[in-house]
Amino acid sequence: MASGFPFAQLTSNQLTYSERDAGYRRLHAWPEPSYHHDSGLHLVWRYDDARELLEATAPEISNAQALQPLVGFGRIAANPRAVGHLCRHLLPPPAKATADLTDDMLHRRVWATMAGPTGYFTVPADMRSERADALAEHFRRSLPITRETTEPLDVTALSITYATRVIGETIGLPQRDWPAVAEWSDAQSGLLGRWMRGRELADAVGALGRLFTVSGSAVAHSRRHATGFSGHLLAAGIAPRVAVSVVANSLAAGVHTVSGSIQQGVQRLLDDPDRQWWKLLGESAGAARVAAKVLQLDPGLVGWKRNILRPISLRSGTRLQRGPVLVMFAAANRDPRAFADPLAIDSTGKMPLTFGFGRHTCPGKQLAQLAVEVFLRELHSHTPHAQLVAPVRSARSRPGDLLFSGADIVIR
Ligand code: HEM
């Protein structure tokens, strides 16, 4: 990444946190406000532009393709194994229900069932400590049972198990399905941000299909027993077909976003020779400050798609042509035009865009924030003197992914 456009070849997922810091610094010094990436996406990273695109109030900005696979449906249709999975699990095509829904009335109803004052994922202030205790229990149960305290601990695996448990339980999935959720969620995430082909593409379509099949079973079960998140959706008058997609999208949305944030955060915290932020995790209210900063700088989801329907001049003057856009909100969270000193723990500035902005703002935001906070706090309390173990594979050998980002972290 020596010269040229900083994210032309490598994605955040293939960089260490310090390389990301350098890359984002160079990005904000780039003379143009957008970049046409080889993937076909137009990259946009300045704070004001990112916020306007996420908000998507102008008629030229659409969210309808937000969940389209990066490789496009043509490549999937040309892959016989993928087509087999598609026919088995994904026909008739799932309803649009969340991020790519353009029916505003229906979207408002769906969103209110997830977020807002009585939303299913909302963590009310008076329930925060009870929810934190439940999350701490998930952390403990995610630890390898037979591990000696002196043995290395795979934080990447631990964070994925933890996030899977948290999301699986929140959505009300039978416990036997929890271990597979990580794989299915990885498939949906991978289809959005990776240039997949061949067997990998077919396997991802198969796993995505399983995600919808299991979500369909959860909704069918709730129709009989009126329980859990699916029961909550049906009781709110959401049609079963839409409810299946809400369940599937939510299962997919929560696992690698939460676990990727944890992995990258732990790398930054433990690589600091003074361990200032790591030590803060042991102080009251310190973990909430550190988690907020981790989610600003190193979120597990770094960008989100929008589509430009007709050429548009954004309010800043940035001009965008017709076509798909990648809103690099993790980059926008460090824009010096919006944040005085983004790498400082208590820096002042605008609201980070990690969870989106506007109508489609992430409904899992409060749950995700608390889940990251509790994991970091519990990890610190479990291994206060943790050291990073040199990774077996380099960050470069992680898959290129335009949306999702994580790190291979082992501690001792
Ligand atoms: C660190 C963790 C997370 C991050 C960074 C994150 C980020 C985002 C972003 C950027 C969006 C798109 C917003 C837009 O289109 O404007 C989104 C949407 C969404 N997220 Fe999250 N998310 C996280 C965790 C979760 C969790 C834990 C859940 C579920 C329990 C969840 C469920 C959803 C759903 C269902 C949507 C679609 C919302 C809609 O369009 O109505 N997310 N999230």
Image: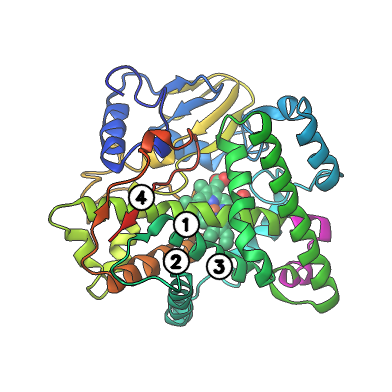
Mark in front: 2 vs 3: 3
Badge 1 residue CB within 8 Å of ligand 1: yes
Span highlighted in magenta in the image:
231-244
Q: Residue furthest left?
A: 274
Badge 2 residue CB within 8 Å of ligand 1: yes
Q: Residue 15: x percent and y percent?
A: 35, 36
Residue at 71% of width from left, 36% of height from top? 202
Residue at 24% of width from left, 51% of height from top? 348
Circles 1 and 2: CB distance less than 8 Å? yes
Q: Quadrant of the N terminus?
A: top left
Is residue 403 rendered magenta in the image? no
Residue labelled with disc 3:
165
Q: Residue 77: x percent and y percent?
A: 78, 28
Residue labelled with disc 4:
264
Residue labelled with disc 1:
258
Q: Choose the circle earlier in sequence order: 3 or 4.
A: 3
Badge 1 marks a residue whose secondary structure is helix
The colour scheme applied to this rendered structure is: rainbow
Kind of residue sitting beneath label 4: Gln
Can residue 74 be seen by looking at this rendering?
yes
- Distance between the alpha carbons at the discs numbered 4 and 2: 15 Å
Q: Residue 347: x percent and y percent?
A: 22, 52
Q: Choose the circle earlier in sequence order: 1 or 3.
A: 3
Q: Which mark is residue 15?
A: none
Residue labelled with disc 2:
371
Q: Choose the circle earlier in sequence order: 1 or 4.
A: 1
Q: Quadrant of the C terminus?
A: bottom left
Q: Is residue 84 left or right of residue 323?
A: right
Kind of residue sitting beneath label 2: Ala
- Distance between the alpha carbons at the discs numbered 1 and 4: 10 Å
